[in-house]
C-alpha cells in the first residue's frame, strides 16, 4: 500500500508482492487505487487481510475502512468514523 497526499493524486494505491528478487527486493505489481480514501493512511494487519486507517488533515477523527474481501482481493466498506476529543500537537 502506498499513500502520500503529495503524490499519487492524494489517493491510496495498492500493490501486491509477487516474488522476491535475488537481492531480497520485493517485486510488486500494481493492483489499483482505493477510491474515497485520503489523508495519512496506515495498514492495520488482521490475520491474512488488512484494514485501512486514515487520519484526515485538520479533523479530530479517524476513518476506519474495514476490509470485507479475501486475501489478494481486498474490498473496503464505507468508513467507520471514530471521533476524538483531543487537540492535535505539532512538533
Image: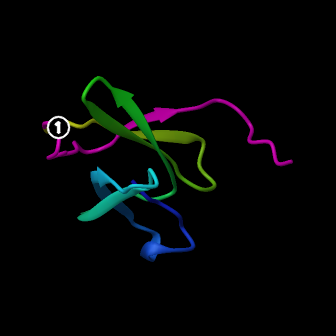
As drawn, the residue found furthest toward the front would be 22
Q: Which residue is drawn at 86% across and 48% down?
A: 91
The residue labelled by disc 1 is 71
As drawn, the residue found furthest toward the top would be 47
Q: Is residue 87 left or right of residue 70?
A: right
Q: Where is residue 67 in the image (x, y as percent from the top left)?
A: 23, 37
Q: Can residue 16 be seen by looking at this rendering?
A: yes
Q: Does the magenta stretch include residue 12?
A: no
Q: Does the magenta stretch include residue 79?
A: yes
Q: Quadrant of the rendered structure where residue 86 is? A: top right
As drawn, the residue found furthest toward the right would be 91
Q: Is residue 84 left or right of residue 87?
A: left
Q: Position of residue 63 (x, y in %)?
A: 43, 41
- Read off the magenta span: 70-91
Q: In this view, does 7 lie to the left or right of 81?
A: right
> Which of the pair 36/4 is nearer the observer?
4
> Which of the pair 3/79 is nearer the observer?
3
Tag 1, which secondary structure? loop
Q: Which residue is drawn at 31% across and 35% down?
A: 50
Q: Quadrant of the rendered structure where residue 33 is? A: bottom left
* Secondary structure, magenta segment, majority class: loop
Q: How was the colour assigned to the protein in this rendering?
A: rainbow
Q: Position of residue 5 (x, y in %)?
A: 54, 67
Amino acid at each position: 500500500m502506498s499513500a502520500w497526499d503529495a503524490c499519487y493524486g492524494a489517493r491510496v494505491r495498492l500493490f501486491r508482492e509477487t516474488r522476491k528478487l535475488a537481492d531480497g527486493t520485493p517485486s510488486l505489481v500494481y493492483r489499483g487505487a482505493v477510491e474515497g480514501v485520503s489523508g495519512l493512511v496506515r495498514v492495520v494487519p488482521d490475520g491474512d487481510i488488512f484494514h485501512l486507517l486514515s487520519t484526515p488533515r485538520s479533523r479530530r477523527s479517524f476513518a476506519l475502512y474495514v476490509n470485507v474481501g479475501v486475501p489478494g482481493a481486498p474490498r473496503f466498506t464505507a468508513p467507520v468514523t471514530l471521533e476524538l476529543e483531543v487537540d492535535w500537537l505539532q512538533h
